Amino acid sequence: MERVVLHSDLNNFYASVECLYDPALSDVPLAVAGSVDKRHGIVLAKNQKAKYYNIKTGDTVPEALKKCPSLKTVEPDFHKYTKFSRLARKIYERYSNMVENFGPDECYIELNCGDLQKGFKTANEINQTIKRELGLTVSIGISYNKIFAKLGSDYKKPDGITLITPQNYKNVVWPLPVSDLLYIGRSTTKFLHAKGCQTIGDLAVLSPEYLYRTFGKNGVMLWNFANGYDCTPVKEIEVKTEIKSIGNSYTAPRDIINDKDVKISILSLSEIVAKRLKCEEMLATTVQVHIRDSTLESYERQAVLTSPTNTAKDIAKTALALYKSNPPSCTARSLGVRACGLISAASRQLILSPFGNTLKTESLERSVDILRERYGKNTILRAITMVSPEISAANFYDEKIIQPFYRG
């Protein structure tokens, strides 16, 4: 019995959904991009017509307009995309109880048919159902492992179906650029190119010992992927994905120029992270800050907490200390706070100290969260937020920013 794995990729997802709501957009070069006024002016997605002008995900809006002055831009609507993502997943679940999200527009589906040719027929059915019921197109890869299935969905776009088998993978996969392999980023690609490794086939014939010496265990993983030795399972629908971290970030309406701006931003972000931790009944053991400066250079720093926590007070204290000990060389443009090393709140031991005070703080913050949920987020505000109304007015809560996923 063969393993049969599908990888579905909804074509030009964000742009295609926007065209469903406004069909006139189908006839023009279109980019889904953040607001220039809010300093989120980056292309997140584009349609086929925009691709003809070499507009790429990650381009700034001014860059994209230079390439195509007639480009139409719309701001992202995350609620629309979530709706269609869920509808597509419901279709996949008609065919299998093993469906795993790989982003809002991509899913892995493992079939029980035991035959790749039967899997190809099922992929055709899914393709037609997505068109008929959602008005979208989907590219699908079918293979005997997740890595090759993912490569197959990228092989023919848009609206393509590609079958990669143990018999044909060397002809289909190995000629592809090494950068097409999952988890190979820009720096790894640059290094491999310098070593004369241009294609996935070049990587596949390298010595795994050499790759281990060069990249550690990740090098061996990439060698296995290139040779089709991936055995990673597709998660069952009922299996809850383990939450490894909880974070929130935002781009300020103006550069963050002083300590009060930093404190307001980190406190606001920490409150959101702490609320989400409480909802998930989790505690953080590590706090991480993400800083992007006005030159768009970014870096992260993290610290282990003395005690696990889910309070905004403790998270913000550590995040502020991290920022102050690692300040940007110029003004900051955006900040992020992330809780990592999560453990279940049920595992916490109720000893006298320091948890006594922590539990009081947690109870107080839960009460504040309830009041804000019921009467609005501005029901209770910290006094410091009055110092810099412009920074405080940023929409820390409702702002949805879809980070670019670089595919070219």
Image (cartoon, helix red, strand yellow):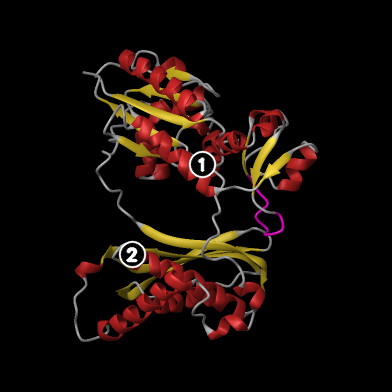
Residue bearing mark 2: 279
Instruction: Assess whether residue 203 is covered by the magenta stretch.
Output: no
Report the mark closest to the observer, 1 or 2. 2
Number of numbered tags placed on the structure image: 2
Residue bearing mark 1: 185
Chain-order first, disc 1 or disc 2 = 1
The magenta segment is 36-43
Quarter holding residue 245? bottom left
Confirm whether residue 44 shows in the render.
yes
| Left or right for 157, reference 280 | right
| Left or right for 72, reference 181 | right
Type of secondary structure dominating the magenta stretch: loop
Confirm whether residue 207 shows in the render.
no
Image coordinates of residue 343 in percent, x first then y, are: 27, 64
Q: Is 166 located above or below residue 355 in the figure?
A: above
Quarter of the image where the N terminus is located: top left
Say which of 396 and 377 sits in front: 377
Image coordinates of residue 250 in percent, x first then y, are: 56, 62
Residue under the image location 73 percent in, 41 percent down? 64
Quarter of the image where the C terminus is located: top right
Tell me how far mark 1 sits from mark 2, CA to CA.
34 Å
Query: Judging from the image, what secondary structure is the residue with disc 2 in?
Result: helix
Residue type for callout 1? Gly
| Left or right for 294, reference 337 | right
Instruction: Assess whether residue 38 is covered by the magenta stretch.
Output: yes
Q: Is 297 located above or below residue 406 in the figure?
A: below
Say which of 1 and 280 sits in front: 280
